[in-house]
């Protein structure tokens, strides 16, 4: 994932607050829904982060524009079983989900490099 300014991209960060015992299942369900994002025109990249205390997940998504984000999130693909299982879990387990849209204003780039293997996630 490459983060840059002045590209016109839209960043969407979705926060999922949950009990520790639910984080593994929620992580599995979100990971299973990521291919739905990949199918959407205008979707650039996404990353799922978990807080080390087991109480929050952050889903970081980049889109080519705000309109692409809206179009992608209203796609009929969200009626697929992976998405339905995720949304059902969120409702059933009372997961607090917040979505916010951001614009990138500054980026810091370090000098450290990491080589990524084909099986890294």
Image (spheres, rainbow, N blue to C red):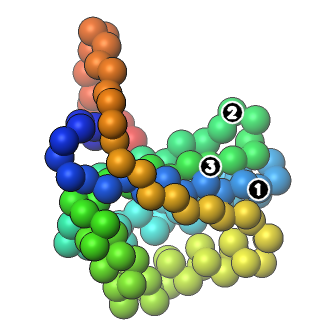
Q: Residue at x 69, y 72 (%)?
A: 90
29 and 17: which one is in front? Answer: 17
Q: Is residue 69 left or right of residue 9?
A: right
Secondary element at tag 2: loop
Residue at label 2? 52
Q: Residue at x 25, y 63 (%)?
A: 65
Residue at label 3? 57
Q: Where is residue 15 drawn, in percent x and y?
A: 61, 54
Secondary element at tag 1: loop
Residue at label 1? 18
Please, is residue 27 above or below residue 97 in the view? above
Is residue 94 in view from this perspective? yes
Q: Residues within 10 Å of mark 2 (few under 14, many from 20)?
A: few
38 and 81: which one is in front? Answer: 38
Q: Is residue 45 left or right of residue 92?
A: left
Q: Earlier in the sequence, mark 1 or mark 3?
A: 1
Q: Residues within 10 Å of mark 3 (few under 14, many from 20)?
A: many
Say which quadrant the C terminus sits in: top left
Q: Quadrant of residue 118?
A: top left
Q: Where is residue 23 drawn, in percent x and y?
A: 71, 52
Q: CA distance from mark 2 to mark 1?
A: 13 Å
């Amino acid at each position: 994932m490459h983060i840059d300014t002045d590209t016109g991209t839209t960043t969407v960060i979705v926060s999922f607050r949950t009990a520790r015992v639910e984080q593994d299942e929620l992580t599995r369900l979100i990971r299973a829904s990521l291919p739905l994002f990949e199918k959407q025109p205008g979707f650039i990249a996404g990353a799922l982060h978990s807080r080390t205390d087991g109480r929050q997940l952050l889903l970081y998504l980049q889109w080519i524009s705000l309109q692409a984000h809206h179009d992608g999130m209203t796609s009929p693909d969200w009626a697929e079983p992976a998405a339905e299982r995720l949304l059902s879990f969120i409702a059933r387990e009372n997961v607090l989900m917040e979505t916010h849209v951001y614009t990138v204003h500054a980026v810091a780039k370090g000098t450290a490099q990491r080589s990524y293997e084909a099986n890294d996630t």
